Amino acid sequence: MSDRTTTRARAWALTRRDGLVLGFTDHDRDLVFDGITFRAGAGMTASALVQAAGLATDNTEAAGALSDAGLTEADILAGRYDGAELVIHEVDWTDTAARRILFRGTLGEITRAGGAFRAELRGLSEPLSIGGGRVFGTLCPAVLGDARCGFDLGQAGFSVEAALTAVSGGGARLDLPEMPEFAADWFVDGSVRFLTGAAEGLVAMVRREEPLGALRRLHLWAAPGAMPVAGDRVRLVAGCDKRLETCRYKFSNVLNFQGFPHVPADDWLMATPSASDENAGGSLTNG
């Protein structure tokens, strides 16, 4: 593209985790390629790319206007763009077949101010900077239903769909039918996925339950980014507190338990042998 300096433009292809694909360009007319319409007029700009050799992290940032036709503040607040995939093309607007990829990665932190947004862009090598390894502790590190856990959440009694009867606390308190077939606190540490309404596709975690006569109130750790209303349908998934007893008696899945419940407690490092007391790693205080 060295001979096309005066006809170059940039185009951003943004793919959200829910599968929605959006296209933007800094050209003054829409561009179309790869089955995506890259809309003009979004005010999209990007700072110079900082690309490193080897496995070092590439990074840059993009900025643009918030609008109904592009990125909206409501969607950003709802977390719909968290971790979205991004590809930046340099393209000849007179012949879109003449193009190259400048950047491929994901969106990082997004800030909003004055009707505009600014987003951190993280390159493909970003995950290599994240520490790894396994933590050995008494609680199970697996996520209920994932490959390590192996539990089938499709089994009857461990998930249910229902309609909200009321919403309060800015969306952090959800009232549902009593559902007597589920024991008290059955959904504590579980999840709520919103199936309809403004919060459709969002997931929130349950902090505690509260019985309210013919209703069951769920208190969430945090309200979803979009406000649900009465009548919205949700899918509830049973909670798991990661303890061996819960895995054994609630889910009958102890063979897949990934924790180490017999690891000695921290006080064990300071304990001294005793002929009269139990040497089990418990508290060293008397009484």
Image (cartoon, rainbow, N blue to C red):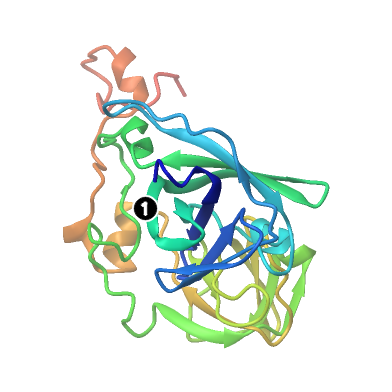
Q: In the image as oriented, which residue stretches furthest toward the right? A: 114
- Residue at left offset 47%, top offset 70%: 36
User: Looking at the picture, which amino acid does disc 1 mark?
Assistant: Lys
* Disc 1 target residue: 242
Return the residue nearer the eye: 187 or 77.
77
As drawn, 127 above or below 67: above
Return the residue nearer the eye: 139 or 130.
130
- Residue at left offset 44%, top offset 62%: 95
**Residue 55 as seen in the image, left or right of residue 113:** left
Q: Report x, y in % for residue 271.
A: 30, 15
**Residue 62 as seen in the image, left or right of residue 74:** left
Q: In the image as oriented, which residue stretches furthest toward the front? A: 3
**Residue 62 as seen in the image, left or right of residue 139:** right
Q: Report x, y in % for residue 204.
A: 57, 63
Q: In the image as oriented, which residue stretches furthest toward the left? A: 255
* Disc 1: CA contacts within 10 A as few (<14), some (14-19) or many (>=20): some
Q: Report x, y in % for residue 117.
A: 70, 48
